[in-house]
Image (spheres, grey):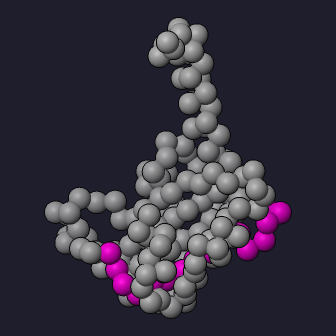
């Protein structure tokens, strides 16, 4: 959450606000379920041994292992996405990396929404890190999670579990 709101609280090169985020991430009112990711996901002790770059952060951020949802984004397509970078970095480098991701993984993005990846850069890094990034994606692969929850609910409802 702090990665999403950092542009509201701290100065940055490319700022975004919650309204802009909502407008860019929700193409249709019923498609408003997001997958959130964060990079780097490392333990506090190992952070000092790793020097991160913008390409490495970007690669980690889009990785399924860094998502906070148990759904694999490679099983769906991204409708929209937003990346918030924190720390001292070049906006040009961020833009280049985001274009590289879109070009390299074009099959994972819908073609009927142009410019569907937005980015913002905040100059203040999170405590204990030099650079970090937060990712919010509106992907069709979220249906995996909903399907799993539905199956678990149906199984419990059949057994009348927790019904009084």
Residue at the (49%, 42%) spot, across then down: 70
Residue at the (83%, 63%) spot, across then down: 112
Quick check: can you spot residue 96? no
Q: Residue furthest right?
A: 112
Which sits in the foreground, 100 or 133? 133
> Quadrant of the image for the N terminus?
bottom left
Quick check: can you spot residue 146? yes
- Left or right of 40, for residue 64: right
Vertical position of residue 160 compared to residue 53: above or below: above
Q: Is residue 117 magenta?
A: yes
- Left or right of 126, for residue 59: right
Q: Residue furthest left?
A: 45
Residue at the (56%, 23%) spot, across then down: 153
Vertical position of residue 17 compared to residue 108: above or below: below
Residue 98 falls in which quadrant of the image? bottom right
Q: Position of residue 63 (x, y in %)?
A: 48, 56
Q: Position of residue 141 (x, y in %)?
A: 63, 45
Residue at the (57%, 38%) spot, across then down: 145
Q: Is residue 136 magenta?
A: no
Residue range corresponding to the magenta coloring: 111-126
Q: Position of residue 131 (x, y in %)?
A: 35, 77
Q: Residue furthest top?
A: 159
């Amino acid at each position: 959450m702090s990665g999403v709101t950092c542009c509201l609280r701290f100065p940055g090169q490319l700022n975004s606000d919650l309204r802009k985020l909502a407008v860019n991430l929700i193409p249709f009112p019923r498609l408003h379920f997001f997958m959130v990711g964060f990079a780097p996901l490392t333990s506090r002790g190992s952070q000092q041994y790793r020097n991160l770059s913008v390409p490495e952060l970007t690669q980690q951020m889009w990785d399924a292992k860094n998502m906070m949802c148990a759904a694999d984004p490679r099983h769906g397509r991204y409708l929209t996405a937003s990346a918030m970078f924190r720390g001292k970095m070049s906006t040009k480098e961020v833009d280049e990396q985001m274009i590289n991701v879109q070009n390299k993984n074009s099959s994972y993005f819908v073609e009927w929404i142009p410019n569907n990846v937005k980015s913002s850069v905040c100059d203040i890094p999170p405590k204990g890190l030099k650079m970090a990034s937060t990712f919010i994606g509106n992907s069709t692969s979220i249906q995996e999670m909903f399907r799993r929850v539905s199956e678990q609910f149906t199984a419990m409802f059949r057994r009348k579990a927790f019904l009084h």
